[in-house]
Image (tube, helix red, strand yellow):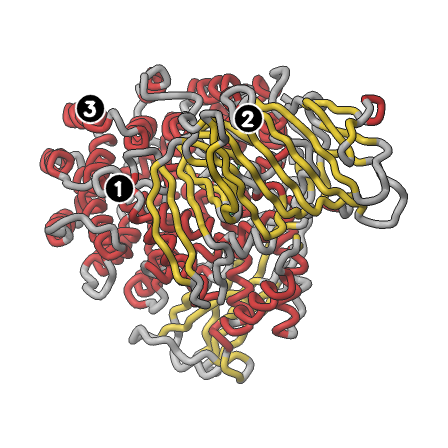
């Protein structure tokens, strides 16, 4: 717990640092509970302005000694508290400061700073963890050259790693200790510092860069897990090549290292030359990892590697600029996956994810701009808005400018800002400079929160052969932003003739560049000429803008688009829109006790997709999944009853299973691939379709459907098929479920990452007994509240993905999660705060649940000694607006 009430940090208060740190030499003697860190900093005043005191950040630090230019500092000339070191009259000239602190990594449960993941020593410094290691100007615009010496008992930590290149290592004569010295020649902010010590196995490889330099690649893992690193290593090499080819970016050190650790607050971390990973995003074998796990590894490995340029070589001036590295790097990893796998499937998956996480965030009390202007706790801003919407904003720049200007703008950014701590303005200016385009209105995507709502009204004039589109945009109010200005919205579109072909687009007598219209006003009309027949309108193709579209489209036209649109995203979207319309009306019917409607048109659209031999299996699988519960709830917007949402959705899936039973059974057989498991996208797509069929056939409650799932569970030779079958069985309260869960546990008890799947599948069962089950599982020997992966698998999945049981009408789900959060908060506030954000949609619930959720939130808010992390989430969740 911090000793002071945190003050908000505001973008407008940004000032350059008063001091610079040129070099930082760390000497770290690892010890389980008393690690000593001796730091030598070369410090100089940053400007010739008025003399400023030197104030270094700390967090729970214990100072052992301090020297200035080699001499001990007299006690009256400095003040050291756990969270600050102040030298009121520091010399106004360059000087050297030596600081010794002592740390307890074993009892560092926050997993920030230096901590232990199992027996391994590792660090996590983003955003403000370095100050838990030593006193420092812990802000990203202070960039220093680091040299790190580590020493340890050889038997405790046989491997000693830090950023950069290895310059020396060896035994310490006359002792059982050894040491290693690492030097990173690239100036970097403290949040990119890392060191690791442990007894680790490794896998080595090498990569020849485009300028023919050889780079050593090493992945370190728990000994015995080396054979699960092949896919991560292969992904790394593909990512390195892709960045050279696509962005001209080459790796810059002699070695690139990845360390997989078992306890990590997030997915992974891009420390310069020494990425630290949650082992979930490194380890994979056919019998322990699903296709989804393989895809996650590929994406996260690429993401962290791409940070080397977008994050490390060019970093952020301050934490308000977080999207500068995160949005851009997510965009880059999404493009990588699109190129490695299927562009259409990647786009649909990314938009699905955006809608369930970012759109939900944007519609609730935690909504914030892609670049916020105020925060209480920066850890709470690693959000879907900063990451996913941040990526959409970069993608829109590409859509507006075209691929060539986009690449030129990126090239300019890399040359102009290399080695700097930059801002969003500087990034966007590069695109303005190369294209000559005024980007000032576009900047609103960074400053205005909320999902714009675009209403489009089409009108065809057969006499004039013209097609007119009247478009209005509204950006809804969000916390602190009641009034919004119009945005620049690039809408890719197509006008489709009755034969399914796109018509040439002529706007104001000129061909439309890239098929994109640009909204800039609250309302605008676009008139297309030479339109020979009434077209079907395909709007926001490829989801060119992250907006909500309101279009008065007839079901017939949606069916036509589902069958004929040459834009695969909008084919998928057409089926989603048909399903959403039906689901919303069936939710209302369910609440008044009626029987759900069926929609022949939707069934026909699905039929057309199922029988289109030209479509990739992964695409068909995505089309078979109706909008998620979170999507439906968001569309309904208020007075949401999660039970009615769940029931309407399940019944629609049962209707699909019933109506298309024969086709689904046939596809199930055809998609069964003989031979050994391969994780490539095509094979994964076939499995995804097969397993979508399996689930739809079982959701009808047919005995044959359940038997097929149980058979698949028992006979599967890979984790994807086994998990898919278990997931299907999990939704049916039958003896087969009990048997399969028991078997799964005994088969994989030794493998924590696999047991996480077992926790998660039980946490998501949509039945009233689940809360008791989850409660009991928190006492299971395989569960540990000290490990974030276990917490996310059991409590996180229950709170975020089990809509009916977290939102039980008696409020017991809320109380359970809140109590867990309160217990976790003193130990790991970051993970606790993330769990707490599950309450973010509480205002949209029906009255009874809303009252229960509010009571729970108020109870948490009233607790003394909440961490700043949880306090911030709860206060914003409860705020009026
Ligand atoms: N920069 C990392 C995300 C990250 C942020 C904070 C952390 O602290 C626990 C860890 C990781 C990324 O984008 O991958
Ligand atoms: Zn990142």
Q: Which residue is mark 3?
A: 746
Which tag, 3 or 1, sits closer to the chain's start? 1
Q: Which residue does the image show at 52% across and 66% down from the upper left?
A: 398
Q: Which numbered disc covers residue 829?
A: 2
Q: Is mark 3 within 8 Å of ligand 1?
A: no
Can you tell which quarter of the image residue 198 is in? top left
- In the rendered image, residue 257, in percent from the top left (x then y), is placed at 43, 46
Q: Which numbered disc covers residue 792?
A: none
> Which residue is at the far right?
50
- In the rendered image, residue 227, in percent from the top left (x then y), is placed at 26, 41
Q: Is mark 1 within 8 Å of ligand 1?
A: no
Q: Is mark 2 within 8 Å of ligand 1?
A: no
Q: Which residue is mark 1?
A: 227
Question: Of residues 247 and 359, which is closer to you in this image?
Answer: 247
Q: Nearer the viewer, mark 3 or mark 1?
A: 1
- Placement of 326 over or under 825, stated as above or below: below
- In the rendered image, residue 513, in percent from the top left (x then y), is placed at 51, 77
Can you tell which quarter of the image residue 61 is in? top right
Question: Of residues 97 and 752, which is closer to you in this image?
Answer: 97
């Amino acid at each position: 717990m911090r000793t002071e009430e945190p003050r908000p940090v505001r973008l407008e208060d940004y000032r350059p640092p008063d001091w610079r740190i040129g070099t930082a030499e760390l000497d770290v003697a690892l010890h389980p509970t008393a690690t000593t860190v001796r730091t030598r900093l070369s410090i100089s005043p940053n400007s010739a302005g008025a003399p400023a005191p030197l104030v270094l950040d700390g967090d729970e630090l214990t100072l052992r000694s301090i020297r200035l230019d080699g001499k001990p500092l007299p006690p009256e000339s400095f003040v050291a508290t756990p969270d600050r070191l102040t030298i009121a009259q520091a010399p106004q000239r360059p000087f050297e400061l030596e600081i010794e602190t002592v740390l307890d990594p074993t009892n560092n449960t926050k997993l920030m700073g230096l901590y232990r993941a199992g027996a391994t020593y590792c660090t996590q410094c983003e955003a403000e963890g370095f100050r838990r290691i030593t006193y420092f100007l812990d802000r990203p615009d202070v960039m220093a050259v680091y040299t790190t010496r580590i020493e340890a008992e050889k038997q405790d930590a046989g491997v000693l790693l830090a950023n950069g290149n290895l310059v020396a290592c060896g035994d310490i004569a006359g002792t059982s200790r050894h040491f290693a010295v690492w030097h990173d020649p690239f100036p970097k902010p403290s949040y990119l510092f890392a060191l690791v010590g442990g007894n680790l196995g490794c896998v080595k490889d090498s990569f020849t860069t485009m300028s023919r330099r050889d780079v050593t690649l090493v992945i370190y893992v728990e000994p015995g897990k080396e054979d699960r690193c092949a896919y991560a290593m292969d992904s790394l090499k593909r990512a390195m090549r892709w960045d050279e080819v696509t962005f001209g970016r080459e790796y810059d050190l002699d070695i690139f290292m990845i360390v997989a650790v078992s306890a990590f607050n997030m997915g992974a971390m891009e420390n310069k030359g020494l990425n630290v990973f949650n082992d979930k995003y490194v380890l994979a074998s056919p019998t322990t990892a699903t296709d989804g796990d393989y895809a996650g590894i590929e994406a996260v490995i690429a993401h962290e590697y791409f940070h080397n340029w977008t994050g490390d070589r060019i970093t952020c001036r301050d934490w308000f600029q977080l999207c500068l590295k995160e949005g851009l790097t997510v965009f880059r990893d999404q493009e990588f996956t699109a190129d490695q796998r299927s562009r259409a499937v990647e786009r649909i998956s990314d938009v699905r994810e955006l809608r369930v996480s970012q759109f939900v965030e944007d519609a609730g009390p935690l909504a914030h701009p892609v670049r916020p202007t105020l925060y209480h706790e920066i850890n709470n801003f690693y959000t879907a808005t900063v990451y996913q919407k941040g990526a959409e904003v970069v993608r829109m720049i590409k859509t507006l400018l075209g691929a060539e200007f986009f690449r030129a703008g990126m090239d300019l950014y890399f040359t102009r800002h290399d080695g700097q701590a930059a801002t969003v303005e500087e990034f966007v200016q590069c695109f303005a400079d190369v294209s000559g385009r005024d980007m000032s209105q576009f900047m609103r995507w960074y400053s205005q929160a909320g999902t714009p709502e675009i209403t489009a009204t089409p009108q065809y004039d057969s006499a004039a052969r013209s097609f007119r589109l009247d478009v209005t945009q509204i950006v809804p109010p969000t916390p602190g932003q009641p009034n919004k200005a119009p945005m620049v919205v690039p809408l890719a579109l197509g006008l489709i003739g009755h034969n399914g072909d796109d018509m040439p687009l002529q706007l104001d007598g000129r061909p439309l560049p890239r098929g994109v219209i640009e909204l800039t006003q609250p309302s605008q009309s676009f008139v297309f000429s030479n339109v020979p027949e009434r077209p079907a309108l395909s709007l926001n193709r490829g989801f060119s803008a992250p907006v909500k579209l309101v279009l008065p489209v007839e079901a017939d036209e949606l069916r036509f688009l589902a069958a004929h649109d040459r834009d695969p995203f909008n084919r998928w979207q057409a089926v989603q829109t048909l399903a959403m319309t039906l689901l919303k009306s069936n939710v209302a019917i369910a609440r008044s006790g009626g029987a759900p409607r069926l929609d022949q048109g939707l069934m026909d659209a699905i039929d057309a997709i199922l029988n289109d031999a030209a479509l990739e299996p992964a695409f068909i699988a995505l089309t078979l999944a109706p909008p998620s519960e979170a999507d439906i709830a968001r569309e309904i917007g208020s007075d949401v009853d999660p039970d009615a949402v769940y029931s309407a959705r399940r019944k629609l899936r049962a209707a699909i299973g019933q109506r298309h039973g024969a086709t689904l059974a046939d596809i199930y057989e055809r998609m069964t691939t003989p031979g050994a498991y391969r994780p490539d996208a095509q094979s994964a797509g076939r499995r995804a379709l097969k397993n979508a069929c399996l689930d739809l056939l079982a959701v009808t409650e047919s005995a044959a459907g359940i038997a097929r799932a149980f058979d698949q569970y028992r006979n599967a030779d890979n984790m994807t098929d086994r998990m898919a079958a278990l997931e299907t069985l999990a939704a049916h309260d039958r003896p087969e479920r009990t048997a399969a869960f028991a078997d799964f546990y005994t088969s994989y008890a030794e493998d924590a990452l696999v047991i996480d799947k077992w926790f998660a599948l039980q946490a998501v069962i949509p039945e009233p007994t689940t809360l008791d089950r989850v409660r009991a599982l928190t006492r299971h020997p395989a569960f540990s509240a000290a490990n974030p992966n276990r917490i996310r698998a059991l409590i996180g999945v229950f709170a975020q993905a089990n809509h009916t049981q977290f939102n039980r009408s008696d409020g017991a789900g809320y109380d359970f999660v809140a109590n867990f959060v309160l217990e976790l908060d003193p130990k790991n506030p970051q993970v606790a705060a993330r769990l707490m954000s599950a309450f973010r949609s509480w205002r949209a619930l029906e009255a009874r649940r809303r009252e229960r959720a509010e009571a729970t939130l108020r109870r948490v808010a009233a607790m003394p000694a909440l961490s700043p992390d949880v306090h911030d989430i709860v206060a914003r969740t409860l705020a009026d607006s």
